[in-house]
Amino acid sequence: MRLFYALTLGPSQKRQMAAWQGALEPLFGHSRRTGPDNFHLTLRFLGDVDDARLESLEAVLWRTAGEIRPLDFTLDRTGRFEKRRGNIWYAGMSRPPEELLRLKRRLDHWLSRGGFGADTMAFTPHVTLFRSVREEADDDTVRRALAGRTVEVSCRELVLMESRTEDGGVRYVPWRTASLEGS
Ligand code: 3AM
């Protein structure tokens, strides 16, 4: 099973992300939008996992969620990751809350204790909007198109998500979900 840990967005936040895509799409050449149900914030990508390790990953989910309080963040900017086959554009945050950074640290801690190693990638909390962007507008044009929109997100759950390839597309489906219950 192909898995990753993530925070998910509610229906209203997903609609607002789709509105960001609507505002930005005319500025880009050919690109691929994240599907309306697939918006999420990845905390740690695992890749294909053997069945024998699923129980440990579930234990990491419960342990981490038990330590972290429900958290809020504001998506208030866009950013991009440069990729050879076309850039990724995302919604990001100017000020990631401390509890989100702590969540990432504790998740990595328990994964490392469980023998899954350290994360090799720097943590840039983001919600992907577009992939394979080859022609893009300059930052000012993008900012103007978004006209100061922000999206408030409240997270109450940590999700171990399955990435499924279906009919040529990818669908993200929660496999296990744990309430954030830290105090
Ligand atoms: O949160 P985003 O959409 O940026 O890009 C993939 C997606 O992240 C990322 O994991 C999330 C769910 O698929 N991903 C896919 N393959 C990856 C890899 N080999 C990867 N992240 C790191 N390494």
Image: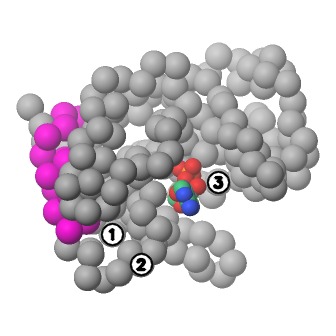
Cα gap from disc 2 to disc 1, whole angstroms = 10 Å
Q: Evaluate whether residue 21 shows in this view.
A: no
Q: Earlier in the sequence, mark 3 or mark 1?
A: 3
**Residue drawn where x is 81% and y is 17% of the image:** 140
**Magenta run includes residue 54:** no
Q: Specify the amino acid type for callout 1.
A: Trp
- Residue 175's label in the rendered image is 1
- Residue 34's label in the rendered image is 3
Q: Residues within 10 Å of mark 1 (few under 14, many from 20)?
A: some
In this rendering, position of residue 8 left or right of residue 86: left
Q: Residues within 10 Å of mark 3 (few under 14, many from 20)?
A: many
* Circle 2/circle 3 CB separation < 8 Å: no
**Residue drawn where x is 26% and y is 54% of the image:** 112
Q: Quadrant of ligand 1?
A: bottom right
Location of mark 2 (residue): 1
Cα gap from disc 2 to disc 3, whole angstroms = 21 Å
Figure quadrant of the C terminus: top left
Q: Earlier in the sequence, mark 2 or mark 1?
A: 2
In this rendering, position of residue 109 left or right of residue 33: left
Q: Specify the amino acid type for callout 2.
A: Met
Q: Which region of the structure is painted magenta?
A: 56-70
* Circle 2/circle 1 CB separation < 8 Å: yes
Q: Evaluate whether residue 35 shows in this view.
A: yes
Q: Percent from the top left, x then y, of residue 41?
A: 46, 45
* Disc 3 Cβ-to-ligand 1 distance below 8 Å: yes
